[in-house]
Amino acid sequence: MLKNNIKITLRNFWKYKFYGSINIIGLTIGLTASFLIILYLQNELSFDQFFEDSDRIHQVILSSSYGGEEFTTSNTPPPVGETMQAEFPEIESFTRHHILNDMVMRHEDNFFTESNVWVVDSNFLEFFSFPLIEGDRKTCLEGTTSVVLTESIAKKYFGPESALGKTVELKNSPFTVTAVLKDLPQNSSLQFDILAPIAASGSVDRFSWSWVWLQMDTYVKTKEVMTEEQRANLEAKFPAMVRQHAASAYARLGIDLEEYFAQGNRREFFLNPIADVHLRSATVNSRLGTTGNIQDVYIFGTIGFFILLLACINFMNLATARSLGRAKEVGVRKMLGSKRSTLIQQFLSEAILYSLLAGIVAVGLVYLFLPFFNQIMHQSLHFSDLWNTWSMIALVGLPMVAGLLAGSYPSFYLSNFKPISVLKSRMSTSKGESAWVRNGLVVFQFAISVALVICTLVVLQQINFTKNGDLGMDKEQLLVLPNVNFLGEQQQAFKQELLKLPAVQNVTISSDLPSKNAFGDSYATKPEEGSSQAAQDVNIYSYQADDDFLPTMGIELVAGRNFDEARGMDADAVIVNEATVNFVGWENPVGKRLSYPGDNREYIVVGVMKNFHPQSLRHSIEPFAIFHESSNSYDNGRSYIAAKIQAGEERIVLDEVKQMWSNFAPQAPFSFSFLDEDINAQYQSEERLASMLSTFTFLSIFIACLGLLGLITYITQQRTKEIGIRKVLGASVSSIVGLLSKDFLKLLVIALIIASPIAYYFMNNWLQNFAYSIDIQWWIFALAGFAAIVIAFLTVSFQSVRAALVNPVKSLRNE
């Protein structure tokens, strides 16, 4: 039976090569897209699950409220892990890491800038089972001067030689390589290049007592796998832990913890399963830089499903449209005794065979297009990832399911023909149930395509807004130099040398810059003497900068003055943004005071700057301040130079600056970036979504038009004699094209009406991820509809014009 079904399928394909090719091409595109998306989803959903005991590992999350501001972060105080292990028998162990800033490492006479150096607890590699190449995971981080490298970093420093026991210099101190790790898997939320003991960072030891210093990431491992209810019961015990153990730390800062909570402030800890860190932590502020969004998984999975569904719909449409051509075959076979079940089996076998053939071709296309897919998705997926159990099931199962889906309606429809009606030529495919179904499927196809076009336009417009919107500063032509700390006492001398370059207009030195980091801490407003206004707590993010920060960055002052080093009094001065003024409720902010509870130091507000965006537009503008560099308010170990340069002079300036750097800091490698590129890099996930949508929108339209071409080709063949008669009676080519096109164009208008509200709903929800976003304009829907109609009209017209130009004598000669 199977052999006979295959013979009939091949015979039909050979007889109707055009329609068979359209079916295979459509299914191939759909399956290729689906296989690529499966690779992506498989990678995203597997994050951090390769760790031993991954189902018992949890990231500690802090949810906090201070001064009316809410934030959730994975940045935790140093003592929390140790306290949890001591207090709660459910917790077996803990480990921590602290991410250092750009570090210069030295091996012999070679200097390297490393931006991914972590200091960790000694049990870090026992807690997280990253595979080792050399060394002992139990002891490699026990020493105060030990260091662990990944395989790539070890090769960069030592070439093919073993790195074990070799020495590198970090922070001007020698460290011994005690282990080498295999390069970390892409599907790990923890991405580092170098591990060093916590002792390598003086800050961690200095703040080991603090429940306010939030610079550590803490992970705990429970003794057994926990249900959500068990985890919630454990988390319910955490508030008592905070009250008991954090009170002394707050008292050291002059804060009564109970009074702090009575004022409505909050410090609550939660446990986030390690498997949820990558995809389900979109609302958690994290320094990891690898967190994704489960929403992207849903979006891409849905797109893959619909792309394959469009290809299946093409198969259904062409099969039902060509039903008249198969009707006599069905009638004859029924007259000869074939059962309906046998015919259904035949037509389903035909669809599955087409789909399996398309699946084989699709696997080859995956291999071919995977590099392009990796590029637009910013991934490092491998073709070999397809050869695991679940992927193999998908490789075989998906074509089978697609074949069953594509062949389901046609097989039941064709097998239902009545032999007498068929053999008496009373069948018609232009009216009745099949026409309604076919039209409905065409509407569905183009509704999906139009919705994707609308979504793509919205995403592209939002990206354009984020790149070109008003950030409250001038990000263009700003050269950024990191590692300024290595200039030591020569920072000001280097700055002055930069200012001597003709193309350099202004230069500033600051602890941080927009798109980089910022220091966040809690402050209290200081009421004026005799004022009835109460002190108010406020969370403020800040930079330390020199006098030239505001003019270099193009940030406008709206009240007061800028820093002025000549006054010699700005060590206790601060410039706040409008958001700070509005939050506190100051009417005349200049001259007001901020108090830092840590040391009761007071800062005088000397100016108010216009709001600018230090973070991406996903975040609303928060209270922000600039402290003068002479204040030494804090030491975050970072320092940057930003130089405003003339347009068109970039290459010349870079060559000169590189030479200057080698003269001033030969021990530190020269690196640079431009601020606009750094800011735009924050929107990588949106860029990825736009690339993905653009690619699959094109594929969806292509598949829909492919099916449309097949339909219009078959319809014109069925109406060949009608077209010939109309031409003999004087019909023009344009009127015949209009006759053949109008029904399809009506369907496209219906598709636009259906797609528009659906696309609006989903994109409006997506835009909620941004504190600042575009308004979805009417012209987006008009443009999407117009583009779809034009493309479909050109597709239909291509075949319609060919039919209309045929000599009527040829089409009527058999009459």
Image (spheres, grey):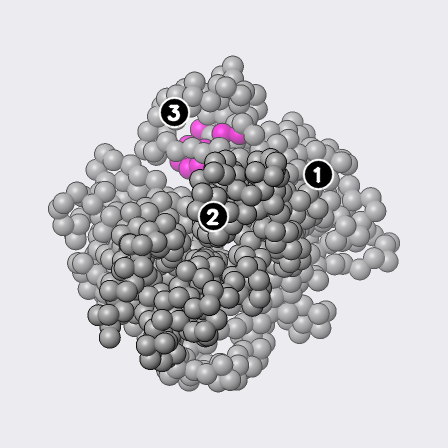
- Measured as percent of width and height from the top left, residue 405 is found at 42, 68
In which quadrant is the N terminus drawn?
bottom left
Q: Which residues are magenta?
A: 478-490
Image check: 579 left or right of 141?
right
Residue drawn 72% across and 49% down?
Answer: 580
Image check: 26 left or right of 72?
left
Q: Nearer the viewer, residue 645 or 599?
A: 645
- Measured as percent of width and height from the top left, residue 74 is found at 50, 63
Residue drawn 23% across and 42% down?
Answer: 156
> Looking at the image, do the residues carrying marks 1 and 3 touch, with CB atoms under 8 Å apart?
no
First in sequence: mark 3 or mark 2? Answer: 3
Residue 609's disc number: 1
Image check: 486 left or right of 571?
left
Residue 815's disc number: 2
Residue drawn 27% across and 40% down?
Answer: 106
Q: Nearer the viewer, residue 446 or 411?
A: 411
Q: Amino acid at mark 3?
A: Lys
Q: Secondary structure at mark 2?
A: loop
From this viewpoint, is residue 195 visible?
A: no
Residue 658's disc number: 3
